[in-house]
Amino acid sequence: MTPRTLFDKIWQQHVIASREGESLLYVDRNFVHEGAFHAFFALAKEGRKVRRPRQTFATADHYVPTVGREHGLAGVIDPEIRGMIELLEHNARENGLLHLGIDDPRQGIVHVVGPELGITQPGLTITCGDSHTSTHGAFGALAFGIGASQLKQILATQCLWQKKPKTLRVVVDGTLVAGVGGKDIILAIIAKIGTAGATGHTIEFAGSAIRALSMEGRLTVCNMAIEAGARAGMIAPDDTTFRYIEGRELAPQGADWDRALQWWRTLPSDEGASFDREVHLGGSALEPTITWGTSPEEALPVSAQVPAPGEMAGADKREHAISALAYMGLTPGMALTDIVIDRAFIGTCTNGRIEDLRAAAAILKGRKAVVPAWVSPGSSQIKRQAEAEGLDRIFTEAGFEWRASGCSACAAMNGDIVPAGMRCASTSNRNFEGRQGKGARTHLMSPAMVAAAAVTGRITDVRTLL
Ligand code: SF4
């Protein structure tokens, strides 16, 4: 039998029908958030209901504020925002969906709660109307973001027409040094291949450095696969994966667990399976990595200097660098560690998990932030777990605000905004112009690097504080 990739195995198992250039895929799991109202509206207009309600999960995350949450829905002051949260609840109730609303103790950011509840599992096809759905691929699932009309198709039929992507294997071998993790790996990969480097491909991340990552680290890597232009990112499931899933609320139990495990173990790419492209990266040489510009590919090791546009290969990249330097207020040749920051933020579906909070707290313990800083855990469960471990006290004693879970500071919602001209050390996934507020300057980095920047007031190599 021809050796197959992880992607091929999942794809072939989910194809229902094929026609010129595309296939009809069965969708195992679908997530919706407040932004799904268009699709529900279109569905209702046709007199339809969700066809497989047990396979769609609703969570309030994109619109929920990160402050005042002790008052639940009543604490949401803005009537428009409250209306969006209520609309999701209404649509979930009308269609019989599991709904993790603002008051549910399991509420959280969609790409955090899926894995946390055991909804995300190896071998599944998973969709959500959010580009960072690639996150779930960390479990060896085929997970990708969809638009509103595709969401309506899935709600109505549990299927979706898709063009088959090509495959790209990114191999990261070697042992990471202390202070370097999943965020540094993915920023270094995007810097190497560019934001269009994986366009039309599904990436399988492989190699000893990837295998050594925890599930949290793998989730961060797959989360940002989309920033390299990939349709999806995946990592072969292994014992790290299975240990994470076992016992979670919606994970298979008893004999179902044994059956699932048997199948999951067959999923990794076969020896000799061929990929359309392959890229290699040395893990041992990686440093903590940060972005200096306004695209995730404009990233460098922390020991580097701000580059000059003339160093860029290609006119497009040179032009982009010129406008990025102007927007970011940086001068070529200055050391990245000389960049002074004004804000520090830890959270989002990229880096709001318990291990992220622990890594940041380890740096903050006994130190004080010299800039305004805040933390928004990726889910309400993570918030409680962090509180049980005493991490909240470390953050607040260091001067960080301890907020509730939500997407706000990823996309400048609910007043979670970085003021114009201010520079934020952020664990989020996008540093586009205006992403964290009009005129806001975002530098992407790991949670430990954000903590280091918060206590020194400038971009800092976290390894000097370990
Ligand atoms: S944190 Fe940002 S990227 Fe993640 S789900 Fe929310 S809006 Fe999307």
Image (spheres, rainbow, N blue to C red):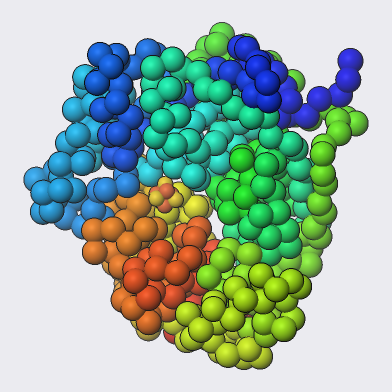
Task: Please give the name of the residue rendered at 41% of the width and 30% of the height, measured from the top-left corner.
Answer: 149
Q: Is residue 300 above or below residue 408?
A: below
Q: Quadrant of residue 300?
A: bottom right
Report if residue 453 is visible in the image: yes
Task: Please give the name of the residue rendered at 39% of the width and 34% of the height, measured from the top-left corner.
Answer: 148
Relative to 77, is 134 on the left or the right? right
Report if residue 136 is visible in the image: no
- Name the spot of residue 428 as percent of width and height, x first: 47, 60
- Name the spot of residue 404 as percent of width and height, x first: 28, 53
- Name the spot of residue 457 as percent of width and height, x first: 44, 84
Residue farthest to the front? 20
Camera-side residue of 210 and 320: 320
Camera-side residue of 393 and 294: 294
The N terminus, quarter of image: top right
Q: Is residue 65 above or below residue 340?
A: above
Task: Please give the name of the residue rendered at 66% of the width and 54% of the height, measured from the top-left corner.
Answer: 196
Task: Please give the name of the residue rendered at 72% of the width and 76% of the height, measured from the top-left corner.
Answer: 312
Q: Quadrant of residue 235?
A: top right
Relative to 330, is 171 on the left or the right? right
- Name the spot of residue 147 as percent of width and height, x first: 44, 37
Q: Quadrant of residue 41?
A: top left
Q: Is residue 405 above or below residue 39?
A: below
Q: How many marks?
A: 0
Camera-side residue of 273 and 452: 273
The C terminus, quarter of image: bottom right
